[in-house]
Image (tube, rainbow, N blue to C red):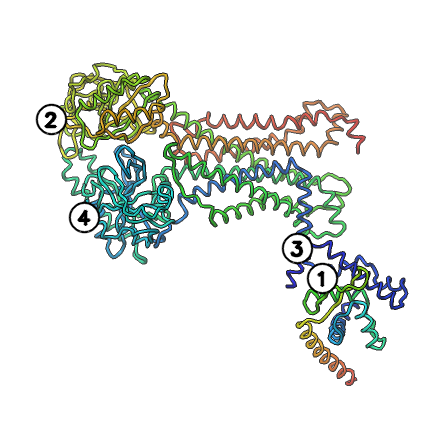
Amino acid sequence: MKKTDALQGSLDLLVLKILSRQPKLHGYAILTAIRQTSGDVLNAEVGSLYPALHRMEETGWIRAEWAPKDAGRRTRHYQLTASGKKQLDAEVTRWHAVSSAINRVLQEA
Amino acid sequence: MSMWSRIVNVFRGDRLNCEIDEEFAAHIEEAIAAGDDPIEVRRTFGSPLRLREQSRDARIAGWLDNLRVDLVFGWRQLLKRKVTTAAAILSLALAIGACTSAFRIIDALFLSPLPVAHVDHLYALARQGPDDLGVLRTFDDFAYPNFTRMRGAAKGQADLIAVSFAYRTDLTYATDNEMEKGYVQYVSGAMFPIFALQPALGRLFTTDDDVTPGAHPYAVISYNYWSHRFAKDPSVLGRSVHIGDKAFQIIGVGPKSFTGTEPGIITEIFLPTMMNPVVTRTDMSWVRILAVINPGVPHEPLRAKLDAVSLNYETERAKGFVGMSRHNIEMSLQKRMVIEAATSGVSRLQGDYRRALVWLGVLVALVLLIACANVANLMTAQAASRAREMALRVSIGAGRWRLVQLVLIENAMLAFFSAVFGALFAWWAAPFVVSHINPPDNPAHLVLPADWRVLVFGALLTLVVALLFGLAPALRASSIQPIIALKGGEEPQSKRRFMYALIAAQIAFCFVVLFLAGLFVATFRNLSNQHLGFDPKDLLLIETYTPRGQTPEAWSQMADTLRAVPGVKAVAIASWPLFSGGWTGSISVNAAPPTDTWGYFLSISPGWLSTVRMNLIEGRDFNSADSFPGEAIVNQTFVKTFFNGVDPIGRTFEKVNPFGSRQLCRVIGIVPDAIYNNLHEPILPVAYVPTRHLDEKGTINPADGGTFLLRTSGIKPLSLATTLRRLVAKTNPAYRISNVQTQQELVDNQSIRERLLALLALFFATVALLLAAFGLYGVLNYSVLQREREIGIRIAVGARIGSIARLVTAQIFVTVFIGAAAGVSLGMASVRYVQTLLFQVEGTAPSMLIAPILVLVAAAFLAAFPAVRRAARIDPSIMLRAD
């Protein structure tokens, strides 16, 4: 559980970033995109992804809609909302601030 | 948006679950299609249920979901125990409804402010002092000239408004043969402007409409009257209404909200005070005085100033009272001015019903407490039977507050349903009670709005009730120790102690309700069993007036005509019926100075005594030659008071009037004592004099009003009314009938308040007793259930039924006696405050205390019986094997 919590901030960031590049992705596609764009380094867990998606949906950063796939089946697509874009900018800024701070600390040593 | 969707999701929980599952399924499918290992993919989901819960929590308002679950569960619990639920809801609904009804009436009569400007500064003037019999009273009637002086004196500090007592009178919009009744009130022209009221139609009075006596024949009608009498016809303006011998032109309709200044009466026609024929009279007190006191003006100096003006006026007037005893003059000058808040108006109904309503309020509040205690006990017993369920919930991790919420919600639902039914009850009950306040043909009209005040009261009451009966059981249920409950062990003794305390409280309150009901019933019984001194049954009264007066011959001709009607046995005439008015004078025997005690008079025709069945003790009845002054027939109290009990036949006395004139009467007969005017007052000294009145020169004074009394037989008196009305109009058109009623009604009307109080108190006493008995039964039954094993063992080792009964009931009877003792002391303490509502009832008399105790003990025995029987029938072999 603790691990998930620690990851959560960056998971939101990754999901938002991916959705900003490529609108309308379903959960599996997001998972795959995270893995591929990070060069197989980052591997989000299903158990963290979906609660995060649903939470962000309720917060209003992303919007979901059902899209028909084939023969009565459908998938749930996610896309960024206006407030999601703003949140992404904020997260990116925060990430840069945090990572450069961490870098500085590491360089000191 | 987000909060809203989370709230919405609460009510589509199943669909939400499906959607989440569907999304997961799609994910797995995609992964497999992309070539992942199916088993590995599924494993990444871990426990799908937990994942679903997590996602669900993100998308749903948790507290609301809990609430929904508790509501559904509570509803099922309530349905499961239909009888208990119905009993609880019924008793609470009755109690809540009764309380709300009482509040509606009290609010309408005493609390809700008149819909007028400056209502926070509205006061009424009154004088306090001894009445004719020396009893301290408040008088709120003033003579108009006195009002004029006070108005002048208060100028700049307060605006004074004169309003007459609203009264029901005959009036017509067409001819005299089509008379109808209406409530008329004379008001100062300044009233409408000071109250800043706007007309719904036409115009309202101004000060210019109230200047010269008799010169402003205008009327303003109320909106209410306009609606029900004229169906809001705008052409009502300009029509004239005939009241007495005057015609008034309708110039406007008042605002919708304003129904007059007397709660209990909806004024229909307003007239300017200057149009009252007695406006200049110094000896007629007929107006109430309302005062709008300017902000910042101190009351005491203003009161003192008005007091001085009024006293000065009365003193000047008293100088002419040569026919009044010194003592009586002094008494009349002892009255002192008081200024009282009149935010909700002033009316006689307020004075008559203030205490009665307060006590009614106390009764319903006690019934409410009893009902709450009852339901609290039911709930506690219920909580005990659910102990295992609660213990299970605690052991699988339910929080304490979650349990409190669970039980509280169930109770809140109970309270809610009770409140709904209670509201329905109050909707019906309040107008029902109000319609029984006044005589049936002329009920009180109280505006009873279901406004926010009533709603707030109802909501607060429901909340208090829910907390009263629900909080303790909820806290108890939540403090359960799973280890004890799941082991199936006995619960702590404290739970039962709590129930017994509630029972004791119930018994105490129930005793107070029974005791008060007993007092009120005894009062009503004493009043209706009063010895009247005459026979009011089958006695029809036709009140008439003849604007120009009629000779004694015309009066007796009319009496002869009425006597010929089939079903009429005897006819007589009186100036007015007994129980409806008074005429007083000081008495002087042997030219002595006027007495302190007043004598009371009534003019009667020959044959009146036999018509009302008042038998002469001595002497003879009047004949057509007798007159006043001249002859008189007196009652026994009169003989005792003024002739020291010596046989007065043939002796004379003088009726001395305030301004000194004396009328000589020779006593020709003695009759037994009869009640003259008021059921509640002691017997008065009464002199009956002939209807043939002579003036100072000895010529006949034609009577302009009088009442025909008809003794009927074999026929209901009122069934003759229509025939007689027509007959009177045909025989002599100069006679106008203002009222047809029975003497019995007049007598009954004086005990309406007592009857209402007795009936309502009896009703609430029955409810209280039923509730208390039911509560007692419930607790006993519960304690037997709890101790079944113990009782089984006792029976197995040879206990007798007697000792089992004692075992089961001992504690409860101790409780009942503690409760009753507390009730007795409560009752004793309260009796002082009810005494003014009682009639010939000694509140502290042992009989008044013993009766309710006996009733309570009997009820307790009845309630205990089923539990004792149940205990005695326990079969040890079955009981002990079962566990």
Above or below A62: residue B853: above
The answer for which chain carries disc 4 is: B
Q: Is residue B251 left or right of residue B762?
A: left
C-alpha gap between disc 4 and disc 1: 82 Å
At mark 1, the secondary structure is helix
Query: Residue beneath label 1, please?
Result: B58
Asked if the residue at tag 1 contacts the one at tag 3, i.e. Cβ–Cβ closer than 8 Å, the answer is: no
Front residue of B719 and B270:
B719
**Please, which chain is the residue tagged with disc 1 on?**
B
Amino acid type at circle 4 is Thr
Q: Residue furthest left?
A: B697
Classify mark 3: residues with Cα within 10 Å, few (<14), some (14-19) or many (20+): some
Marker disc for residue B64: 3
**Residue B597 seen in the current view:** no
Identity of the amino acid at label 3? Leu
Judging by the rendered image, the residue that carries numbered circle 4 is B212
- Helix, strand, or loop for circle 2? loop
Query: Which of pointers 4 and 3 lies earlier in the amino acid sequence?
Result: 3
- Mark 2, residue position: B699
Q: Nearer the viewer, residue B531 or A58?
A: A58
Disc nearer the start of the sequence (2/4): 4
Q: Amino acid at mark 2?
A: Thr
Question: What is the chain letter for disc 2?
Answer: B
Q: Chain of mark 3?
A: B
Q: Calculate the distance from the C-alpha at mark 4 to the C-alpha at mark 3.
A: 72 Å
B675 displayed left or right of B658: right
